[in-house]
Amino acid sequence: MSELNLTHSNGNKVKLTTPDTLAASETFKLPGADGSTGQFLKTDGSGALSFATVDTSIADGSITAAKLAAGVGGKIIQVKYKRGGVTTSSNSGGWTDSVESGLNVDITPVLSSSFILIQMHSVGGNTQSGRSFFLRLRRKINNTGDTNVASFQIGDGNNGGIQSLALTHVDNDPGNWNTSHVINYRIRFGQDGSGTARFDYATTSVLYAMEIQP
């Protein structure tokens, strides 16, 4: 086995040797200049060596199930959100689906076993004293199966009941979707037949959908 010894002035050596096995002759061409701090020596696959910088960016669509650590749950895989865009902010005659083309968010799971954490923040309520306000979270998968997945009801206060609204829901129903599905979430609001239901009142509503690794 051939080796190349580089001897230091103190007598110590740096030794370069051939590999234990070599099926054919190899030629490596060294770079013509030194690289920058932190760079590494790479090959073009044909023996030409050069210095390069490590690419730490993540390309779109590059996170796959195979790249996630097995057995490590609770990781946020992706976040989708919509801020503003509410098309209907008041209702005085029952339910109103205010977000079909406004405040809604689409998410396509990276993992078929993931669950989706949804959060909504707005301001609203029923402007009439003594009446109720309803808020529902609706879900469609590939634009079908319009389903109510979460809801709450609030009364109103002495000054009309306009207040901060927050909804958090964990959609843990992965049997209904896979990695080719587009899951759409939106908000539906209304009142109990009297007064005026207000949504997105003097604010900009936000709707988040976060995919969580189980």
Image (cartoon, grey):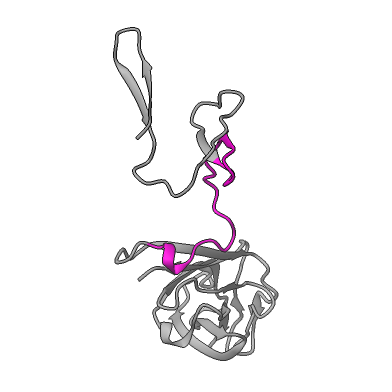
Let me know if residue 201 is in the magenta part: no
Is residue 52 shown in magenta? yes
Give whichever of 85, 50 is nearer the camera. 50
Q: Residue at x 42, y 86 (%)?
A: 175
Residues 3 and 90: in front is 3
Q: Which residues are magenta?
A: 43-68
- Image x and y of residue 1, in percent: 34, 35
* Residue 166: % across, % down: 46, 68
The C terminus lies in quadrant: bottom left
**Residue 138 in sight from this viewpoint:** yes
Which of 135/106 is in front?
Answer: 106
x, y percentage for residue 91?
64, 82
**For residue 101, what is the image quadrant?**
bottom right
Name the quadrant containing residue 4: top left
Main secondary structure found in the magenta portion? loop
Q: Is residue 43 above or below residue 148?
A: above
List the single residue furthest toward the top.
Answer: 9
The total number of labels drawn is: 0
For residue 128, above or below residue 145: above
Q: Position of residue 66 (x, y in %)?
A: 42, 66
Residue 134 is at least partly visible in this image: no
Side of 211 where 61 appears, left or right: right
